[in-house]
Image (cartoon, helix red, strand yellow):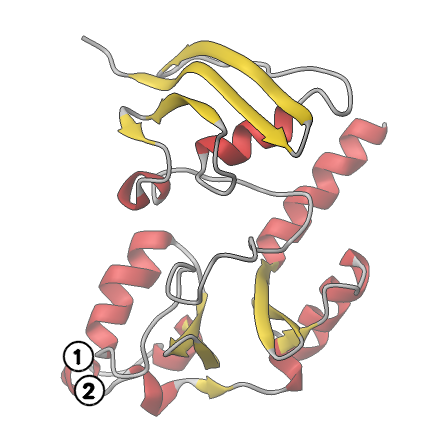
Amino acid sequence: MTVAAINTEGLKKNFGERAAVKHLTLQVLQGEVFGFLGPNGAGKTTSIKMLLGLVRPTSGSATLLGAPIGDRPTLGRVGFLPEHFRFQEWLTAREVVSVAPDLPLNQLINSYFLHYGYKGFPVAQAGRVLGMVSVFNVKGLPEDQQKTKTVAQVMEPLNDDLLISPQVSLTEALSKMGQTEAGRLVVMQGGKMVGLISKTGLLRYLEMKRILEG
């Protein structure tokens, strides 16, 4: 029996007294192309965020690839390009895909670069961002050094070239990435990491926006 890619039953989300999503029940089979259409304010984005565990449902239930919504291993198999590059206030640095400074480089390569397909990751410890580590920091290292060296020994410490404000426009963000050759930037506000933005994600978003605006 084929497991549904998406299955929801009576999914509902209220923001105060306003119902953003009312009893959403649907099933999308694996391999199906499904158009989720509706006017602004219909609850499309809220529904998707509930499926990804970014917004908690008021009531109802749902599964994503057969797993309960918010299941972390399952989320590693899903791609999502948000309109705004911010994390939810209740997310911690541990819940964002980050790496520890004492992680051996061979584990960084196999469990992060090759597993997730990103060229760089924030380095965090005890909820504090220390810097960024990219594939270019480990490129060409002999295998014996990959086993003995850790992320802390090759990472780039946090500096202005790696940081960006959430108020900065997308074109300014792209320009900064081009000038600094950074593949990803940490979005900081008030000394706290509130998001992570990548060049690939930005380009995809801008291309999609260009197509839609015709």
| Residue 173 tag number | none
Q: Residue furthest front?
A: 17
Provide the secondary structure element on which disc 2 rests: helix
Q: Is residue 17 rendered to the left or right of residue 74?
A: right
Is 39 placed above or below 156 here?
A: above
Relative depth, front residue between 112 and 96: 96
For residue 120, above or below residue 104? above
Q: Picture coordinates of residue 117 (x, y %)?
A: 39, 54
Question: Residue at (16%, 87%) from the top-left corner?
Answer: 148
| Residue holding disc 2 | 145
Residue at (69, 72) in percent of width and height: 164
| Residue 172: percent from left, percent from top | 80, 65
Q: In the rendered structure, are the residues bearing label 2 and label 1 in contact, judged by CB atoms less than 8 Å apart? A: yes
Q: Is residue 32 visible?
A: yes
Q: Is residue 71 above or below residue 28?
A: below
| Label 1 secondary element | helix
Q: Amino acid at mark 2?
A: Gln
Could you say which is closer to the camera, residue 43 or residue 146?
A: 43
Q: What residue sits right under mark 1 in the picture?
A: 143
